[in-house]
Amino acid sequence: MCRELLSTELAALVGESYSRAYQDMVRAQQCTELQEVIQYTMASDIHTRSCSRLQDVSDAEERKELIRNIWRQRIQVGGQGSGFRAEV
């Protein structure tokens, strides 16, 4: 929802100038990361529910691993050239 609201404005701004669109691009990235945190938390919550099916738990673990890999890649790419390396 958050990204959908930004998409129209962002598309117009990028056409005008990158510097004008930058803040909205940052907000869109923040929305994506917030959505990932929510999904990761929801996937973690499946383990606490005693009525969870095995397939649900398996799907949740796959989703969590996918999100962890995305986070690792972001850290690696973001840290290139800065000398910063972090383990996730």
Image (cartoon, helix red, strand yellow):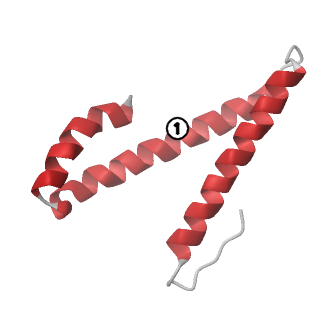
**Residue beneath disc 1:** 35
When the figure is inspected, residue 85 is found, relative to residue 41, above or below; the finding is below
Q: Residue furthest left?
A: 16
Please indicate whether residue 53 sits to the left or right of residue 30 in the image: right
Q: Residue at x 19, y 61 (%)?
A: 18
When the figure is inspected, residue 41 is found, relative to residue 77, above or below; the finding is above
Q: Residue at x 70, y 38 (%)?
A: 63
Please indicate whether residue 77 sits to the left or right of residue 64 in the image: left
Where is residue 27 drawn, in percent x and y?
34, 48
The answer to whether one can see residue 81 in this image is yes
Callout 1 amino acid: Gln
Q: Residue at x 47, y 43 (%)?
A: 32
For the residue pair 44 and 73, the one nearer the viewer reads as 73
When the figure is inspected, residue 1 is found, relative to residue 32, above or below; the finding is above
Q: Residue at x 89, y 18 (%)?
A: 50
Dot 1 falls on a residue whose secondary structure is helix
